[in-house]
Amino acid sequence: MPALAEKSPPGGGYTLVEMVVVLAVMALAAAVIAPGLFRSETSGGERVVRTLTEVYAMAREAAVTRGGGAQVWVNADEGRWLALVRSGGTSRWDTLGSGSLQTPAVRLESGGERWAIVRFDARGRAAGRSVGVRGPEGVAFLRPNHWTGRLDVARR
């Protein structure tokens, strides 16, 4: 009758050195991979910069499409924005959109003024105030480019 359990031959297990090496490799892999898993996609300041860039582009596009003008108002104190547009030949402003830019640890600056207003004409040219976005990763200044109507973003 065969034995139900056979004894393993001597030396069949792992040595202490082998286990330490495996644990060291696993710890190294965890140290490299873990920060990427727990980091948010973009920081608060970068989200604000991206949102403002998209809002300005939307307002510029609406000004050109409607042949009128558009304005983007950014309240630096409250962290809110409002975009207005009007069709060519009318004096009535319609709301294009509004939203909040409030993010923890991010502060907006507009040169000491409460409002930073950028205006777009029917050809998409821009005029107005710069907005500073101060976050944990540094400062970004968003300046409207008069000729292209786009935002120039300078980071420090």
Image (cartoon, helix red, strand yellow):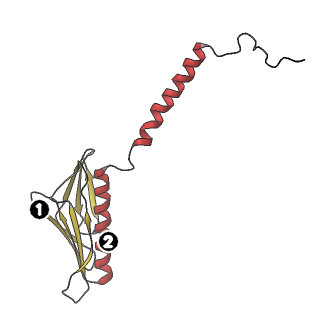
Q: Amino acid at mark 1?
A: Arg
Helix, strand or loop at mark 2: helix
Number of marks present in the image shown: 2
Residue indicated by mark 1: 114
State the mark number for residue 58: 2
Residue in the image at 79% along x and 16% along y: 6
Task: Select label 1 or label 2 by which is in front.
Answer: 1
**Residue 46 place in picture, x, y as percent:** 31, 52
Residue in the image at 25% along x and 87% along y: 88
Instruction: Give the Cα separation between the discs numbered 1 and 2.
Output: 23 Å
Q: Amino acid at mark 2?
A: Met
**Residue 131 place in picture, x, y as percent:** 19, 59
Q: Is residue 81 above or below residue 69?
A: above
**Residue 114 place in picture, x, y as percent:** 11, 62
Residue 122: image quadrant is bottom left
Closer to us: 120 or 82: 82
Residue in the image at 28% along x and 84% along y: 67
Residue 111: image quadrant is bottom left
> Is the N terminus in the top left, top right, bottom left or bottom right quadrant?
top right
Helix, strand or loop at mark 1: loop
Residue in the image at 18% along x and 60% along y: 130
> Most extreme residue toward the left, as rendered?
112
Q: Earlier in the sequence, mark 1 or mark 2?
A: 2
Q: Is residue 33 above or below residue 64?
A: above
